Amino acid sequence: MTAETISLAELRKHQPRFTGLSPGHRACQGCGELLAARLVTEAAGPDVVVANSTGCLEVTTTSWPDSAWRVPWLHSLFENGAAIASGMEAALKAQGRASKVLAFAGDGGTFDIGFQALSGMIERGHNVLFVCYDNEAYMNTGVQRSGSTPVGAATTTSPAGKERLGKRHLKKDILSIIAAHHMPYAATATVAYPADLRHKVRRAIEVEGPTFLLVHSPCPQGWGHDGSRTVEVARLGVQSGLVPLIELERGAVTGVMPIRELRPVADYLKAQARFRHLFADTAEAARELQHLQALAEHNIERYGLSAPGPEPRDTEGADTVRRGGQHWA
Amino acid sequence: MPQALEGSQAIARAVALCRPQVVSAYPITPQTHIVENIAKLVADGQLECEYVSVESEHSAASVVLGAAAAGSRAYTASASQGILLMSEVLYDISGLRVPMVLTCANRALSGPISIWNDQSDSMAVRDAGWIQLYCTSNQEAVDTHIQAFRIAQETELPVMVCMDGFTLTHTMEPLDLPTQEEVDAFLPPFRFDRMLDPQAPVSIGTMVGPEAYSELRYANHHDLLGAADNILRANADWAEASGRDWGGLLRTSGPAEARIGLLGLGSLIGTLQDAALAHPELPPTRIMALRAFRPFPIEALQAACEGLDELVVIERAFSPGFGAIVAAEVRAALSELPQAPRVHAVAVGLGGRDIGLSLYPRLIEVAHGEHAERFRILDLDPERLPQELRA
């Protein structure tokens, strides 16, 4: 009898694993948020209870009587995800149950309308991992600008025109605000680096107390790129310095993903129609481009992101992403 | 054994006897110290529960929603602006069919800002899909809270126990607080079949399209109407255990031969009863305490109005641009009767205006009026009205 050899890649495809979010939901092709949510639930495992704020994630996964969720899940309202999660956690504690509570919200339900409840949840020290799937606008309602929309991005309520170059205000630095709550653990991640995302989910779940994860999640519809380029666009965001991948413990930076191959911000912006107007041949457009490049350079300096060298491939990354749900199971 | 207790303290103790597992509250102004008393019971080790002090009423309602859905008996209390801020969540709680109990210590609404008692707050959330029970005394409030926890979990509907702010919550009254054994025998441990549990995952609060929304809303309405049976049973069982019968949906008092009925909600019932005794020269009245406002007891009301020529509905809130709230429903319910009494609608005691015994003769006057009173604020002070409104 000869031993059968099997490649590592092949083995990975057969590896049994749990996913909290099953395929067949109604999200758009290439949806970054659904991809992120699947990766988060895979990393979190089955012993969780999910509170989901109103948004694309809730709408696309649960058209009654169907549900894509394989974990206990409750959606209440737009702004109360963190408070619902607080109540769940209090109940589990009262009953002596040890399941981890996850709160899922978009950037609207985190940066804007859900912020008060989130701040309260952290202040009270609930044992909840709050995950913000950040697609940088109100995508579910038709791409309106949010507190997370980057400066210069065109949305339906910050359109580009003769007098305006998209959004006139900076993206809210939510991570610093969260970290200022004496936060045990807060981190950013993106769908472009699944291994990093998994690591951060596991790290956050191990913490007994409030933790926060901001997952940069491209929206092909709202950002104006092809659904097949979601991961590429997300990676360009990181490589340009606009989306720093960092970890904060009690407010101090404890982890940084270095950028090996720095890319100009224009590469990231050019890939998306929401920034198209910034490439017009005008002085204003050029100035706004410079502004965005300066913001990226500020991030690179602030977090020490630049570390030239060979790009380390995210070993499980592309494979994990392509396997999509039960496709290979 | 009766003991003198302040209303808020009595309710805190009654709620504690119901063994809540999660209590959440926010001290919006105006605040009632029910939740402060519960916090003290927790701090003193007399009540084992998760006490969550939140950053808003919206979150207070959300915390108890999350807690009950995760399988815990949950409680909160609020009033006035707090009820309005909660209102979005209140609708969601009933729509998701998650059982819990909330005390509404009834107060007026802004603006102008007022911290005093009327029932504008609970009336504003009339259509939130909650059971609403109104209490006439602190003893009734104690008993109603205990019943409310059972009604909620039997029906999978939330229950709002309404008691007049200040008039009840801040006054001392000798009352009987049941023992833990009595409450335990009446109220089984909390159980919620759709509880969020990783071993049997369910999705609660999914998106519903036009193909099913009407049916789900109808089922809610149907079950809220059906909750009348649970309210009656809880009242009857607790009456047997405690010796105190609060009439279930509606309670009447007064001589059988009375031709004039007076219907109200909450603490003014006691005032009316005292006033009736103080005015033996006036015609007898049948005094009706509407205990259940939701579900609205149509049949019980029709039966209670048997033999009446006149019915004065006394309200503690009104609907600007129309007038009566409760009387509009009373008229609708009685319109089915071949021999319905004339229905008069008056509002009194808005924003904490005192309701004295002197109100009583004026109600009799209204009942004897030439025309049915469509709606009138009976205790307006003409001196404080602008000149052009003094008629």
Image (cartoon, grey):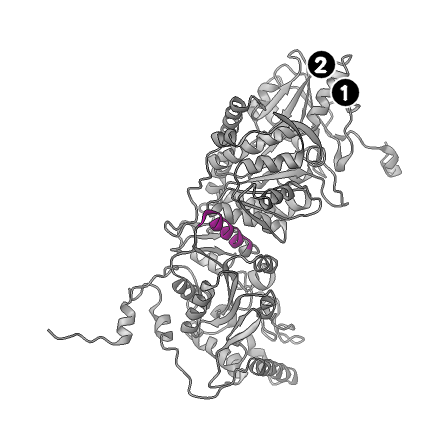
Q: Chain of mark 1?
A: B
Circle 1 residues within 10 Å: few <14, some 14–19, many ≥20:
few
Q: Residue furthest bottom?
A: A309
Three-letter amino acid code at the position of disc 1: Gly
Residue B275 visible somewhere in the drawing? yes
Q: What residue appears at the point 50 percent right and 26 percent down from the top-left corner?
A: B233
> What residue do we see at 75% from left, 32% from top?
B349
Q: Picture coordinates of residue B114 (x, y %)?
A: 76, 43
Q: Nearer the viewer, residue A16 or A99?
A: A99
User: Picture coordinates of residue A13 (x, y %)?
Assistant: 29, 70
Q: Quadrant of the C terminus of chain A?
A: bottom left
Residue A85 belongs to the span the image colors magenta: yes
Could you tell me how far apart the alpha carbons at marks 1 and 2 are, in whole angstroms?
Answer: 17 Å
Residue B269 counted in the magenta span: no
Q: Which segment is the magenta one?
A: A83-96
Above or below, comparing residue A126 to residue B133 in the picture: below
User: Going 51% across and 44% down the picture, which residue do you hit?
Assistant: B21
**Element on which disc 1 rests:** loop
Please determine whether, in this image, residue B254 is positioned above or below residue B169.
Answer: above
Expressed as whole percent of the image width and height from the top left, the position of residue B248 reads: 56, 25
Q: Nearer the viewer, mark 1 or mark 2?
A: 2
Q: Which residue is mark 2?
A: B284
Percent from the top left, x then y, of residue A240? Answer: 52, 82
- Report the disc number at residue B369: 1
Amino acid at pointer 2? Pro
Q: Name the secondary structure under disc 2.
A: loop
Q: Is residue B330 visible?
A: no
- Quadrant for residue A284, please give it: bottom right
